[in-house]
Image (tube, rainbow, N blue to C red):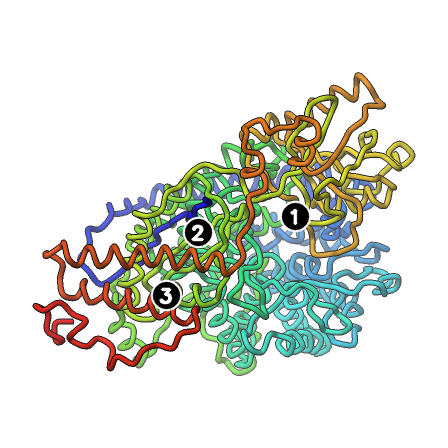
Amino acid sequence: MAYYQVLLVFILAIICVSTEDEAAVPRMTRAERQQLREESRRMFYHAYDAYMDNAYPADELMPLSCKGRWRGITPSRGDMDDVLGNFSLTLVDSLDTLVVMGDFSEFSRAVRLVVRDVTFDHDIIVSVFETNIRMLGGLLSAHVLATRLRGEVAVLRWYNGELLALAEDLGRRLLPAFNTSTGIPHGRVNLRHGIRGLLESRETCTACAGTMILEMAALSRLTGDPIFEQKAHRAMDRLWKIRHRTSDLMGTVINIHSGDWVRKDSGVGAGIDSYYEYCLKAYILLGDEKYLARFNRHYNAVMKYISRGPVMMAVHMHRPHLQSRNFMDALLAFWPGLQVLLGDVRPAVETHEMLYQVMQRHTFIPEAFTSDFQVHWGQHPLRPEFLESTYFLHRATGDDHYLHVGKTVLKALQQYTRVPCGYAAVNDVRTRVHEDRMDSFVLAETFKYLYMLFGEDRDLPVKLEDYVLTTEAHFLPLSLATDGRNSSYLTLKIDDEDEDKYKKTCPSTWSLVASRVRRPLRRMLGAAARPPARPRPLTDPRQLLALADMGISVLTLPDGRVQLLYTTSTAKSSKDAAEGLTFMREMSKWNTLSDMESGVVAAGVKINERIFTAGPAHFGKEITGDDRLEGTAAFALPLDACSEIQNKHEIVGKFAIVQRGQCTFAQKVRNLQTAGANLALVLDNVAGSTHETSALFAMSGDGNDDIDIPAVFLFSQEGTYLTEELQKDPNLLITVGELKSLKRQYEDTCEDGNCEAVLHSPVPADKETFDHLKKVLSQLVAQFELSLSSEDSKTCEENANMEETKKKFVKVERRVEGENEPSTGSEGSSRDQPADCKPDDV
């Protein structure tokens, strides 16, 4: 009989009891802060000088090759290159970082170079979103700072608005993207020809369409031409109109012509992140209260449906109680910083601590990770979002813990990513192998936030509270507002009425110490490392409702395991919270964890007489049952298959072998399909990996349904065997099918003697799952009754809480069975309490 097993992670939020404080975070001396600030400065210049000496005027530096990355000249990386426009991206994006560093001479020289060399008259298709936040934002920020410093700094007295002229030219080249029936802009635009040739473009992401208002409004108010702001307002208004009216959540991909949602998963990470950010910051910068009202509606929805304590799990926007995916992505690390701007510091501390633990486990935060902190996508392109939130949390709390977090990030960057020619992205956090990539945001944001974190306001040449920082950390002045309602967003202010409310909260917000919020979350790391359990999903909304009332959230992990997260702050009441704690304690006693295979239905690859375990794909043709594909194989060129296949004649009608990395699985297979391959064999790029020691997974899709050929994934050691055998025999015959079926056909038996149970354990229907849960709850109720009769030392309150728990579970069972609840008088009557407890004692 299969047992229902869960992975328990206790996230015990602060409750109003006397607790022993964790060891105080050591204060960082001013001398150490200055030392780290100067080290941050040296890091910036190591990267900046490497770019200027070896790459300028190219868009980016390739730090391993020590040369520039040019659009149309350097080998293509597919959609990743849409950020490039041959317009000296890294220099423009870094201009205001030079000001933050106080290097006015280099800033003046760099501005002269931009004015002299940068042009936008290129027949190149670029990302509207990336060009807006990096190029347009960089030009506007540098213009504002140059104008303000012109009267104070002699080397800038020559400046006369040249950057603003460039910004206006670029803004007008982006305007054609807004020519849609909905006002939602195209995701891409040709810098010279507008949307000509892009009419088949139909989709864009929510963040792509909703992260225009700050830069476009600033451009309008600085030039006096309202067209830019009008277009961005219209796009934001349309996005608000198509939100889900019941949940107030947004999806991630939209049809720009119809306004229909293409992808309805809703989170706070990739595809949607900066839309929420710009709703709040549009109010701060422009003083338009409609954006604050919209953000508040969205924020309440996010905290209600997506936030699971410190964990942020995407849900279906139209069915927000259902989790839409089993992993989180690194871009959500901006969220705690946004919460600080709103003044909601406590959940910001919690989520930041969760992210810090992910970083401590893997040295860097991987591009995507599961709720038990396992790597989902291993890349780390030196993203700034975690440092951004660290900076804002330190500014809000004054807690030196965040200085130590920043120091940890700084040392990791120095130890693992510094190369002679700049800083190289990490291709996989598990191996720390480098990638020949240094994005412009490393200089524009990562090093800027490091420097500002360790610096003090008096060390900075700009008064930070006079500006809004865009999603690319560019400076836009609060003076752009027309009505003066946008007070400094870097200073938390609470009016008198709210002050009394916060003092009466439990615990008092004024006495809240960030370390006390972080302390119980420290248990997550150890608990999450427990062995996996067989998947038994909890999907019945009645189960989830009963658990949610007690502050217990249910997460489904990538391999199908169930994880219970308990936080007192999300419970319906203090009594429900006590019930939840009791339930988790009892469930912990009952729960037994054992090593089992993941819930992925494994594929098999037969090479000679050996059968290897392979991962399937969430896209393309599914290989099930007795399906078989047989054929010969050839390696694709380029091997990563991230651009057009060059050796189509060699792979047409064959199994095409490619290597993991550089682009998405779906993009690789799509390129192979176009080239005529029958099947994609993706080999792991992590040296030495094998299915015997690595968790099996299914390759993720990208939301499109245009791939028809099957794809399977082989780990590195299995891929090495395949490569060696192909070198011996180029006509080697390979068979691909479902692993269980292949083994049954060719081996007659499974190696472990239990193939059926391990590889294809049935997933129970909802009713079976719920029946099993009822059985568990009945066992727990029996345990409660036993403990009531045997533990005389329990208090009346504890006994009463157990009685309430018992009633709740019995009610849930009756509702499922369709029974009417018996009329027993008012709840909590004295007959339900021990004889020595009076009603007033409870």
Q: Earlier in the sequence, mark 3 or mark 2?
A: 2
Q: Residue at x 88, y 34 (%)?
A: 647
Q: Which residue is mark 3?
A: 570
Which element is circle 2 on?
Answer: strand
- Label 3, label 1: how far apart the Cα atoms are: 32 Å
How many residues crowd mark 1 within 10 Å: few (<14), some (14–19), many (20+)? some
Q: Residue at x 69, y 33 (%)?
A: 742
Q: Which residue is mark 2?
A: 563
* Residue type highlighted by circle 2: Gln
Pick the residue in front: 833 or 305: 833
Which element is circle 1 on?
Answer: loop
**Where 279 falls versus 315 (above or below)?**
below
Residue 89 screen position, x and y as percent? 70, 51
* Residue type highlighted by circle 3: Thr
* Residue type highlighted by circle 1: Ser
Does residue 65 appear in the picture of this structure?
no
Pick the residue in front: 559 or 787: 787
- Label 1, label 2: how far apart the Cα atoms are: 21 Å
Q: Which residue is mark 1?
A: 700
Residue 323 found in image quarter: bottom right
How many residues crowd mark 3 within 10 Å: few (<14), some (14–19), many (20+)? many
How many residues crowd mark 2 within 10 Å: few (<14), some (14–19), many (20+)? many
- Label 3, label 2: how far apart the Cα atoms are: 16 Å
Pick the residue in front: 837 or 349: 837
Residue 822 screen position, x and y as percent? 31, 78
Residue 128 screen position, x and y as percent? 73, 61
Which element is circle 3 on?
Answer: helix
Does residue 234 appear in the picture of this structure?
yes
Q: Earlier in the sequence, mark 1 or mark 2?
A: 2
Contact? badges 3 and 1 (CB < 8 Å): no
